[in-house]
Amino acid sequence: MNRLRILFFVLLFFPIMSFSQEKQNNFEISKSIDIYNNVLKFLNMNYVDEINPAELNETAIHAMLKELDPYTVFIPESEIEDVKLLTMGEYGGIGSIINYYDNNVHISEPYENFPAHKAGLLPGDAIIEVNGVNTEKKSVSEVSELLKGQPGSKLTLKIRRDGEKDIITKTLTREKIKIDNIPYYTVLEGGVAYIILNQFTRDAAKELKEAFLEMKSQNELKGLIIDLRGNGGGLLNEAVDIVNIFVPKNKLVVYTKGKTPEQNRNYYTKHEADDTEIPLAILVNESSASASEIVSGSIQDFDRGVIVGQRTFGKGLVQNILPMTYNTQMKVTVSKYYIPSKRCIQEIDYSKKAKNDTLVKNDTLGPQFKTANGRIVYEGHGIQPDVKIEPEMLSTITAHLYAQNMIFKYANKFYREHKSIASPEEFEITDEIYDDFVKFVEGQEFEYTSESEKDFDELVKTAKLEGYYDNIKEQLDILENELKSHKDNDLINNRKEISEILKMELVGRYYFQKGKIISTLKDDVELNRALEILLNSNGKNEYETILNVTETPSR
């Protein structure tokens, strides 16, 4: 009887608390708006210089939303094109990646058959002016806004090209730039289909289904690999529809929980599956996020395929884009999503941000859940792959060559000097090409500090602090010379990994993004491991073994 009375009291008390809290929140909102209006008004009347109310307002909004999570953002009218890119994979522009170095924004990679490419723009071209606006020392985002616009509108670029004295003027017509969800697919040796999915914008599921069925109709497939590495996500419904290609109708793929009942939704597969039997492998890495984690996580929970690679990003938050006044919008986190095993894969609890501004990923495994076959999986830390492969770390010199654009600049030079190269499948970095690259680097202002040098400097500093330096100076000088002699050979000792990046950059000049992809397939560690699993090339049915394990994996 007492328990019933307590339950009745709780049920009665909670609505009162909820109403009271809502009333208090409404008062605080009205009070805050009134204070904000007064601050802006008094600034306008009293501040010593003229203010820009629109800029101050936007700054205030951004600062406010920064206290929440990184995905809740205000979208001014000027950035509406970016929303189109986010949701539909398209925007109005010239079709090129741009980057900043040497005090200028440069063309980094024109998209094949889009305005930048058709106008003859080349990687390395420095953008000096856009429609009469000087762009020197402007940021990538500022220049990007100048380049975007309505499809069909014209713009005039002034560029400076390496090896040419005169400024070049180009007139381009903006087009609707549609970035491919699937930049490449093929059937690999052994009869395994391979599809790269770069994003989950509109029609991603339709395009993946068409690519898969096309390869299936023309080949006797032994398996399928879907590559989600680097895929930061996109539309949730596209993720559900992709899972539906391989999972039967009426299966719960993901559900969301939010503050209001409208945000609590279940997402089921709606159609009959196209193939529930083909062995399936999903490639992921730490940049696979959001919709990528819905696909890989639900495939794992259904035991429908094997996940290969590194732990995913851990973004289990769902955003809606809400229209606001004056053609502005706001992308708001409205719920968290949960996959079939009922686990949420969100990595960081942003509700604790106010108490801890140094939020980092947590390596401690969360609560246990089970897949359809009883395998143990964990909540809260992205998707843990079934087959973990440690990422290959670049050497210090390779990282600096890339960051300082040495490889990029050499590729521009090479492209000017060579009209053609072998096909992406056949092209290799020869001794002659690599020697030429080394000479190029030696002729540049290329400097870097190795990790050993950093440690050595700390050692010297500590030895001086503790009074040992004078006694061991001779040994330190010998060590310093040894380090220098080894560093001088870094370009030779790290040739293999430098050549891999150099090859991809050079192939991209002649065969664009698709060529880059083809050139890397042969040496792709994760891809080759997935092939090994699907083809049983190690002599045992590893695929079935992985999916039927019921014991708890080690923490």
Image (cartoon, rainbow, N blue to C red):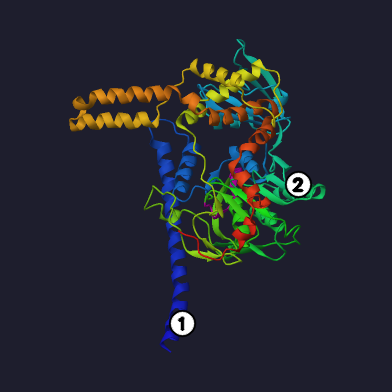
Between tags 2 and 1, which lies in front? 2
Q: Badge 1 local density, few (<14 within 10 Å), some, or many (20+)?
A: few
Residue at the extreme top: 165
Viewer can see residue 126: no
Across and down, in percent, residue 83 comes to 62, 43
Quadrant in the picture for residue 526: top right
Residue interval drawn in magenta: 314-328
> Is 542 left or right of 188, judged from the image as shown?
left
Residue 479 or residue 293, whichever sits in front: 479
Say which residue label 1 marks: 8
Amino acid tagged 2: Ala
Residue 176 or residue 478, whichever sits in front: 478
Residue at the extreme bottom: 1
How much space separates mark 2 and mark 1, taking CA atoms? 58 Å
As helix, strand or loop, the secondary structure at mark 2 comes to helix
Quadrant in the picture for residue 481: top left
Residue at the image position 63 percent from the left and 26 percent from the top: 506
Is 430 situated above or below 41? Answer: above
Residue at the image position 44 percent from the left and 49 percent from the top: 67
Across and down, in percent, residue 370 comes to 55, 66
